[in-house]
Amino acid sequence: MSREETAEHVPPEIVAEVERQHALIMRGTAYGDDATRRTMETELRERLTESLINDRPLRVYLGVDPTSPDLHIGHCVTLRKLALFQQLGHQSILLIGDFTGLVGDPSDKDSLRPMQAAEVLEANAATYRDQAFKLLDPERTEVRRNSEWLGQMSFGDVIHLASNFTVQQFTGRDTFRDRIERGDPVYVHEFMYGLMQGYDAVALEADVQLGGTDQTFNILCGRTLQSRQARPTQVAVLTPILVGTDGRQRMSKSTGNYIGIDEPPDAQYGKAMSIPDASIVRFFDYGTNLSDAEVDQIAAALESGELKPMDAKRRLARTIVAEWHSADAAHAAEKEWTRTVSQGQAPDEIPDAPFDFGGADTVDVALPVLLHEIGAAPSRAEAKRLVAQGAVRVDGEVVEDQNVTIQSGAILRVGRRKWYRIVPR
């Protein structure tokens, strides 16, 4: 029976279920243009109909490159979609990009991404499964690695794969085009990423691929390769990129504006409380497990003034901590944040920060050097800026000089949330 004939004979109950699933899946998606959205909406509806008529779950996959050991809540925007497909009865596939990770995805970079060592990727991959299973049902999740097929390809296979694309398709991408216009190098191996991810879709026989909006080109590469092999093309379900806690740049560990799903409750709560007011609803929508109706209520209450931004952020912080830890942990984290940040009191437990006192009880030191060495600032330049802004206190007093005398056991506070007890190494 053809697709057109099938559509004419779809039972009403299947039509209703297709529309229900379609609405849930497309909620919160984002596409670069209306034409792409309409195409994907139409194809998704067709795939869902065929799936229900034939009692064949859709094969839906999300690829993650293990380029760092931790997942953050920005990663969970697409992970939640994968969990949704799973809850709707479809086959969810978590693809660990242990081979694509060797190259690194250039989609969100305006410079060369350093190549990762295989042993680093392997160590990171080991943590990804456990973290992802906080959202996914491990018993119903198919976990694959793309080294299973990419690692077996010959050079001839790679040449054949590359023959499906033109150089202009790649150099037309914003990230590559901008670098070329600046005179920055673009390396041939960076072109390989889109080819490899495209072949993942072929190898997995994917019906749907999930990704952020930055993955549009790579997912379309998969559709190209599937069509060249006369296979049904996968549907792209794209989600927005979650901004970081600074409210400006995309969430990333490299920029430090992330909330890790394995971070301690106090760290998660404190980072959530630093989110700008303008980003609160977006974080509720894409960074928590609240229902659409609850998020809509929060947005309306903020808009009307019934809910104050500070109270909304407290709820956001509690929601994030409760999801990844527990309600009790969220309550304790809120209590600690109120005491140490809102009221300015020292926490009950302050971590020791060893420093070389040279055998003495006190030491004269450049404060930026101290801050950088104990890990309170990523660089001496950043540490100097923190001191100049009055963000550093020693034993409760704001330090204005770059050079200070530190006594063993001194309590150092950096910003609103970082506390250290300086002890001899």
Image (tube, rainbow, N blue to C red):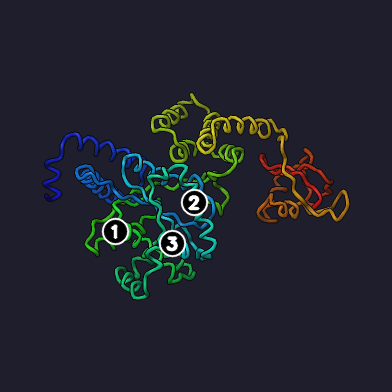
Dot label at residue 175:
3
Judge from the rendering whether residue 382 lies leftward or rightward of residue 133; answer left or right.
right
Where residue 388 sits: x, y (%)? 72, 48
Q: Amino acid at mark 3?
A: Thr
Q: Nearer the viewer, residue 142 or 221?
A: 142
Judge from the rendering whether residue 266 lies leftward or rightward of residue 227; answer left or right.
right
Where residue 107 sits: x, y (%)? 43, 59
The number of numbered discs placed on residues in the rendered structure image is 3
Residue 311: image quadrant is top right
Q: Amino acid at mark 1?
A: Arg
Q: Residues within 10 Å of mark 1 (few under 14, many from 20)?
A: many
Viewer-nearest of labels 3 and 2? 2
Q: Is residue 388 above or below residue 167?
A: above
Dot label at residue 128:
2
Q: Residues within 10 Å of mark 3 (few under 14, many from 20)?
A: some
> Which residue corresponds to mark 1?
223
Q: Amino acid at mark 2?
A: Tyr
Q: Residues within 10 Å of mark 2 (few under 14, many from 20)?
A: some
Q: Nearer the viewer, residue 85 or 38?
A: 85
Furthest residue to the top?
Answer: 306
For numbered disc 3, what is the local secondary structure? helix
Image point 51% across, 49% down: which residue?
71
Furthest residue to the bottom?
Answer: 156
Residue 17: image quadrant is top left
Badges 3 and 1: C-beta atoms under 8 Å apart?
Answer: no
